[in-house]
Image (cartoon, rainbow, N blue to C red):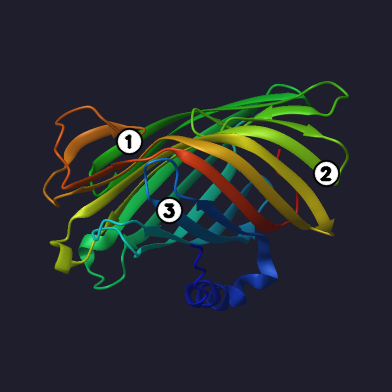
Amino acid sequence: MIRIRNFYLIAFLFFSIPCFSQLTAVDSYTEYSPAHGDSSLQMQSQTVSARFLLSKKKISSWSAGMTYKNLLTSNNTSVINDLWLHSVGISLMYHTKTTDRTSMTISVQPSIWSDFKNISGEDFRFSTLVHFITKQDEHFSIGWGLAYSYQFFGNQIIPIIDIRYRKNAGNWKIGGALPLRPRIEYDFNNNTAVGFKLEGNYYSYRLSPQLNSQYLFYRQWDAGFYFDQRLTGKLYLTAGVGYAYKRSLQIFNKDQTIPLSFFGNRVAKEFTPSYNNQSNGMVYKIGVQFRLFKEE
């Protein structure tokens, strides 16, 4: 069952209107995963994000972003049946050149991740990123960095290696942040491209006090093909199909936290969740994007 709720999407865009004069990109997409095999779990999520420029100098710039994301689950289990979770975040980014070939980006993002039934200080999360990228030549660049986020299950560290390569005078591209967002793409022309990508996601949402302020830990890796088509001007349509593996939905008590995790993998205590669903299956994605430039 697909359910699309528009109130938060409309509210998000409404509060973004004052920034439209400096708008650089808007992304909106829906992801749907139907029930598979013996599992009755269905999931759907929508994401809307906007980025806009605050100021720009010769070698540096400040920009900001706003993101809204939701996750809707449907299952025969009463705990997660018709469970609708949300996140809203505001990010601030600073970009500058450190050498002729190397640039640095620093970002911070406070956000709320919960079921929005009773928002409190327990629902707030924080993440930050430091990223460098060096352009070796016109066809190859390499980046590295470190991302940190305070999750409800504890502190999460994600080292990042970013590789971007385009074959000389060719249409093949390899890019993305390893290990979470690698992809390979073939551009037929300036309007149409197809590709294959791998994507990893780790989220945690705070549940309401009626559920003892537990947190839901969501983990998913999916691999699949995508199609990217420019509709007109700077407007693009993206559609994809893939398979989700190592996907889990787990609910833990609020005090079942750990000191540190890498990519969502706990390096300390293992706790027994009050709810656990391991369910792989197909994933379908479709989105519309407005961007002033096509990202490499």
Using the rendered view, name the quadrant where residue 235 is placed: bottom right
Q: What amino acid type should be assigned to the residue bearing mark 1?
A: Gly
Q: Is residue 248 left or right of residue 98?
A: left
Q: Is residue 154 left or right of residue 104?
A: left
Q: What secondary structure is marked by label 1?
A: loop
Q: What secondary structure is marked by label 3?
A: strand
Q: Is residue 219 left or right of residue 62?
A: left
Quick check: 90 above or below 13?
A: above
Q: What amino acid type should be assigned to the residue bearing mark 2?
A: Thr
Q: Is residue 180 left or right of residue 187?
A: left
Q: What secondary structure is marked by label 2?
A: strand
Using the rendered view, name the quadrant where residue 137 is placed: top right
Q: Earlier in the sequence, mark 2 or mark 3?
A: 3
Q: Earlier in the sequence, mark 3 or mark 1?
A: 3
The mark found on residue 42 in the picture is 3
Residue 105 position in % (x across, y down): 53, 42
Q: Nearer the viewer, mark 3 or mark 1?
A: 3
Q: Is residue 182 visible?
A: yes
Q: How would you rate the neighbour count of disc 1 (Cα within 10 Å): few for under 14, some for 14-19, many for 20 or more?
A: many
Real-space CA distance between mark 3 and mark 1, rounded to the nearest whole angstrom:
22 Å
Q: What amino acid type should be assigned to the residue bearing mark 3?
A: Gln
